Image (cartoon, rainbow, N blue to C red):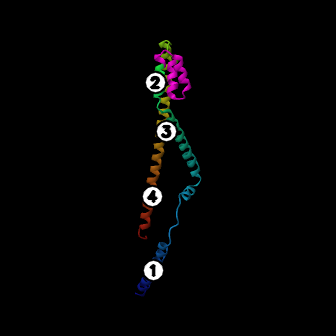
Amino acid sequence: MITLLLTAIDTTKQVIDSANAAKTVLTTAPPELHFIDLLFKGGWVMLPLALLAFLGLVIFIERYLTIRKSSKDETNLMFQIKQNIHEGRLDSAIALCKNTKSPLARMLEKGLKRIGRPIKDIEGTISGGLYTKMITSATGLIIGIVAYVLYHILNMMVEKIILKMETDAIEFIDLLEEPGK
């Protein structure tokens, strides 16, 4: 009986001590966590990640500016070229294309230079260029597909590790919750 009473008193003291400790923890504010602190906690791995993020941003900006520059409206150029061709001034149309810095002007210049050439020369050039483009496109697709498959293989490996760790964690918690043997 006395043992039971001493155990009850000891348990009460432990509950009071735990309540006081919880009160202290709850009254103190948690330390502020800033974004820069998270970056530093990432360790050395954050350096290549930051470099890749910066490189990706630079490539995006460069491509965006190039595409935006190339997609400007060139109706005036087309109007002037049509006018020169209708008036029989092929040299003026070619000169206009040379002096205009745009993808459309470069394409039209190449087309204007082929006026008067036999059709066989043009077909040979187109088919040779098309063949090269098809080969490079197929190679690019193969590389992309292989990279995509490899990415998913790595992703599956990571998911298996996560599943195994979760299973082990549950097993460990079950072990801790088992009554003493």
Place of residue 155 in the rendered image (x, y in percent of width and height, measured from the top left): 46, 46
Tell me the tag on residue 16.
1
Give the amino acid type for the residue marked by disc 2 in the picture: Phe
Label 4, residues with CA under 10 Å away: few <14, some 14-19, many ≥20: few
How many numbered marks have been drawn onto this rendered protein structure? 4
Locate the N terminus by quadrant.
bottom left
Q: CA distance from mark 1 to mark 3?
A: 60 Å
Q: Position of residue 9 (x, y in %)?
A: 44, 84
- Between residue 83 and residue 50, name the one nearer to us: 83
Q: Nearer the viewer, mark 3 or mark 4?
A: 3
Sequence-first disc among 1 and 3: 1
Pointer 2 residue: 79
Dot 4: element:
helix
Comes first in the chain, label 3 or label 4:
3
Magenta stretch prevailing secondary structure:
helix
Which mark is first along the chain, 1 or 2?
A: 1
Of the two numbered discs 1 and 4 on the same chain, state the one appearing first in sequence.
1
Magenta extent: 84-112
The residue where tag 4 is placed is 168
**In the image, residue 138 lies in the stretch drawn in magenta:** no
Asked whether residue 54 is in view, the answer is: yes
Asked if the residue at tag 4 contacts the one at tag 3, i.e. Cβ–Cβ closer than 8 Å, the answer is no
Q: Which residue is mark 3?
A: 147
Q: Secondary structure at mark 3?
A: helix
